[in-house]
Amino acid sequence: MKLHVLAASIVAFGISATVAVAQSNEPIQVIKPPSQINLGMVELGKKLYFDPRLSKSGIMSCNSCHNLSMGGTDNIPTSVGDKWQQGPINAPTVLNSSLNVAQFWDGRASDLKAQAGGPIANPGEMAFTHTLALGVLESIPAYVREFKVVFGKDKIDIDQVTLAIAEFEKTLVTPNSRFDQWLLGKADALTGDEKAGYKLFKESGCVACHNGPAVGGASFQKMGVVSAYKANDKMEGRSAVTGKDADRFNYKVPTLRNVEMTYPYFHDGAANTLTEAVDTMGRIQLGKKFTADENAKVVAFLKTLTGDQPSFLMPILPPSSDKTPRPTPFSK
Ligand code: HEC
Ligand code: HEC
């Protein structure tokens, strides 16, 4: 791994020099801001992300369940969908989701674009159809103009919608956490307890699964390696996609970036606190019982993974026209 030199400041004619040297060879790497972003597409995608007119009820947007004021989640065990339906699974954060090997707990969507069409047409989520959603967008002159500017085509199609949303999602990375500052060489960015927590996190074996820039998101792993996990649901994980028995109860390892904000935890949302999640992980993944003091240190470390949250002006959505089909929140 390359050694990054963060800051080298030569003071007063080179008499003294201070060099902050970055931590290399760590299992966790810094998150970088996105590069190569199409700004027009991002602005359009941001509007679509917040637009509840892509739902049947007219009140549900991507932001309803992936609230960017709350770590990109809904902070409830399983999501509430159209007509107050109880969702089957916990909503993962959209923050840093561009770093995931695949999307969803079982990885059934290969990337963000493939994912973005799903919720609009999912009867348990936004409960619309792609055709109806496109009809709404086509009826709003400002959208028609903006799609034309961004994609250069006369007609709006679902590919453009999902591309734009995915491009916006690529900007939802959270660099500059205290942990990243420490990785980059700022030795006092972490307290003694937080450093001790990171040491425990590494030495206990958490990094076998939670590693890389997202501290997860890179592989599918069994939930319950050492002892079985008694889930609050009947989900079977990755085997739903691969059909392989060996993949039963395998889930995408969640990112631990911003994990302090993304409670409750696990695919069934059963763990309300980080203390509980860390205790469960130690026991069922590693056969390790943390003392209360060790647990508190690991939790303290996990909280240093909260980075700069996405910050932008709330998008103002173009108004519907007389031709725009009206939402039907109460009809069957
Ligand atoms: C009703 C709540 C709800 C709405 C609305 C919703 N989502 Fe989700 N989202 C979820 C849930 C629940 C999951 C996890 C489903 C699974 O893994 O089976 C999810 C998963 C995702 C993921 C995968 C993240 C990961 O780490 O695997 C992304 C990305 C995402 N949603 C983006 C969106 C976008 C974009 C929209 C709007 C077009 C949207 N969601 C609308 C609840 C919702
Ligand atoms: C064998 C791989 C593996 C190991 C080792 C492991 N984890 Fe996990 N971790 C996972 C998987 C898979 C999930 C999601 C499981 C689920 O929800 O069903 C998860 C979930 C979590 C969550 C909840 C995140 C969320 O958003 O829901 C936390 C917190 C966590 N792990 C921390 C730890 C800590 C701390 C350790 C070390 C004590 C650890 N993990 C060890 C694979 C692992």
Image: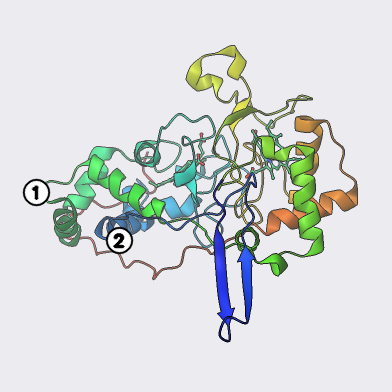
Residue plotted at (23% across, 50% down): 136
Amino acid type at image mark 1: Asp
In-front residue for pair 119/227 = 227
Residue plotted at (75% across, 31% down): 285
- Of the two numbered discs 2 and 1 on the same chain, state the one appearing first in sequence: 2
- Mark drawn on residue 154: 1
Which quadrant of the structure image shows residue 313?
bottom left
Determine contact: label 2, label 1, CB under 8 Å.
Answer: no
Q: Residue furthest left?
A: 154
Which quadrant of the structure image shows residue 218?
top right
Which quadrant of the structure image shows residue 188?
bottom right
Query: In terms of secondary structure, where does tag 1 sit?
Result: loop
Residue plotted at (47% across, 63% down): 310
Select label 2 or label 1 by which is in front: 2
Instruction: Assess disc 1: are there few (<14), some (14-19) or many (≥20) residues with their C-alpha within 10 Å of its C-alpha.
Output: few
Query: In terms of secondary structure, where does tag 2 sit?
Result: helix
Q: Position of residue 144 (x, y in %)?
A: 15, 55
- Mark drawn on residue 43: 2
Reply above or below: 250 against 258. Answer: above
Q: Is residue 9 left or right of residue 200?
A: left
Is the CB–ligand 1 distance for label 2 below 8 Å? no
Whether residue 61 appears in this view of the structure is no
Reply above or below: 50 against 236. Answer: below
Reply above or below: 221 against 131. Answer: above
Q: Is residue 49 left or right of residue 102?
A: left
Amino acid type at image mark 2: Glu
